[in-house]
Image (cartoon, rainbow, N blue to C red):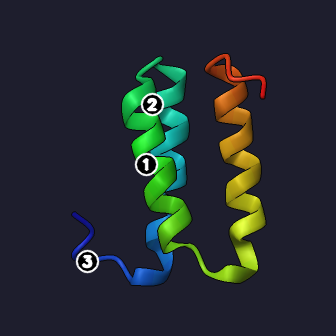
Amino acid sequence: MYKNIGKDYHWKINIELAQTFDRIKNHIKSSEHIKYAIQDSPDSVKWKVWLVASRIMQNQGNQE
């Protein structure tokens, strides 16, 4: 999907896609892109990805 983009930016694109799908209430696609972002992100920024993921999950009604 991201042939012309460096591997170090894939997680950023997936985070943006997850937030976009969350805004339009497509929770399945949002969760899918969060999963990809977590897998692709370097260890030094995983905390940022988890922070965004927790906000998205809270918006979806997951309070645990």
Q: Which residue is mark 1?
A: 33
Hey, what amino acid is under mark 2?
Answer: Phe
Q: Is residue 52 left or right of residue 29?
A: right
Compute the Cα span from label 2 to label 3: 23 Å
Residue placed at 43% from the left, 69% from the top?
Answer: 10
Q: Given contact means CB atoms under 8 Å apart, are the residues at marks 1 and 2 in contact?
A: yes
Circle nearer the viewer, 1 or 3: 1
58 relative to 7, above or below? above
Q: Amino acid at mark 3?
A: Asn
Residue type (three-letter) at the residue carrying disc 1 = His
Q: Is residue 55 left or right of residue 16?
A: right
Residue denoted by label 2: 21
CA–CA distance in space, label 1 to label 2: 9 Å
Q: Quadrant of the C terminus?
A: top right
Q: Quadrant of residue 42?
A: bottom right
Split into 4 quadrants, where in the image is the N terminus?
bottom left
In the rendered structure, the answer to whether residue 4 lies left or right of residue 61 reads left
Q: For residue 7, what is the image quadrant?
A: bottom left
> Which of the marked residues, 1 or 3, is nearer the chain's N terminus?
3
Looking at the rendered structure, the secondary structure element under dot 1 is helix
For label 1, count other residues whose C-alpha is less than 10 Å away and answer few (under 14), some (14-19) or many (20+).
Answer: many
Label 3 element class:
loop
Q: Residue at x 77, y 50 (%)?
A: 51
Residue 34: x and y, percent?
Answer: 51, 49
Q: Are the residues flagged by discs 1 and 3 in contact, CB closer than 8 Å?
A: no
How busy is the neighbourhood of tag 2: few (under 14 within 10 Å), some, or many (20 plus)? some
x and y percent of residue 37 in the render?
51, 61
| Up-down relation of residue 49 to residue 11 (above or below) | above
Which residue is the site of mark 3? 4
Q: Earlier in the sequence, mark 2 or mark 3?
A: 3
Residue at 73 percent of width and 35 percent of height: 55
